[in-house]
Amino acid sequence: MIAVQDEVYHYNVERWEALVEADALFTRPMLDLDPEKAQAYLGLERLGIPGDLAGRKVLCLAGGGGQQSAAFALLGADVTVLDISSGQLERDRVAAEHYGVGIRTIQGDMRDLSALDDSSFDLVWHPYSLTFVPDCRIVFREVARVVQGGGRYYLMCANPFFSGLTHESWNGEGYTLKQPYTDEVAASYPDQDWVYDRTAGRRIHEPREYRQTLSRIVNSLIREGFMLTFLSEVRGDYPGAEPGSWAHFTGVAPPWLEFVWQYGPDALGR
């Protein structure tokens, strides 16, 4: 197990508590869901994940904020949320109280899941956060320990080919890549205007992200005993969008990837 009280940990805690205080987009609990809306929001059918969640044990990993946790709980899942931010976890508790459901919350770092038992989850749901730590392999080892055989791991992360780019990288002809394509290269860039309200002069530390190359992500998960069942490049729909705008950028350089992995260490003779 690693000691997570490092500089990366403290930077992320400070940033996310500030985002909660600013009521940033990712920190607002979803309080208008019903089971049908929850199914549509999670998109389980599109991902090839069985939609019958009654009694299933789901871990929302580094996924606080009262969004995914609320959706899973409304569909009958037994939900645990682990997140680095106490403020984000409070939003999960607000959503749980609003819907009258039970959601277990644990404050912690995704690199250390020692608070969770071995083989205890049917589904680990990991929204965008992997790039906030330098070495994804530590996270994957922890996930492999807590997921059950045959269980699934949903991972949304940065598309490593375009890590560090934003719409502001437009040079008149395209979006300029400048950084070397190597693991753990750090990049920072301003939050998009829609992330939080700046009218009061509020400024929050920029996100600090670390590139995880595609080969490291895929090969590390294979070594941990996972089998890939779904891959999607999340892109924007930009017909008519102005070059250099966010809509155009996301259509030209898909910024996110979605994976679904199934855990089966027996396939590797373990």
Image (cartoon, rainbow, N blue to C red):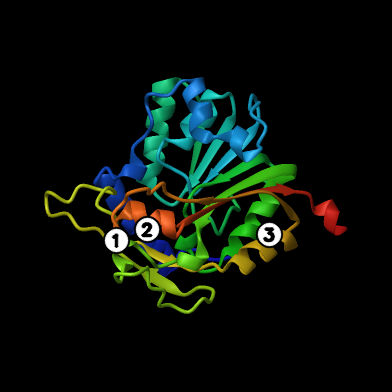
Kind of residue at disc 1: Gly
x and y percentages locating residue 123 in the rendered image = 64, 40
Q: Where, by quadrant of the figure, is residue 29 drawn?
A: top left
Q: Residues within 10 Å of mark 2 (few under 14, many from 20)?
A: many
Q: Tell me if residue 1 can be seen.
A: no
Residue at numbered disc 3: 221
Residue at numbered disc 2: 249
Q: Residues within 10 Å of mark 3 (few under 14, many from 20)?
A: many
Task: Identify the disc placed on residue 244.
Answer: 1
Identify the residue at the far right of this view: 269
x and y percentages locating residue 62 in the rendered image = 49, 49
The nearer-to-camera label among 1 and 3 is 1
Q: Give the residue drawn at x 46%, y 56%.
A: 254
Q: Is residue 254 left or right of residue 224?
A: left
Which of the two discs, 1 and 2, labels the residue nearer the N terminus? 1
> Do the residues bearing badges 1 and 3 touch, measured as CB atoms within 8 Å?
no
- The quarter of the image holding the C terminus is bottom right
Q: Give the residue drawn at x 20%, y 58%.
A: 203
Q: Is residue 248 left or right of residue 154?
A: left
The nearer-to-camera label among 2 and 3 is 2
Identify the residue at the far front of this view: 240
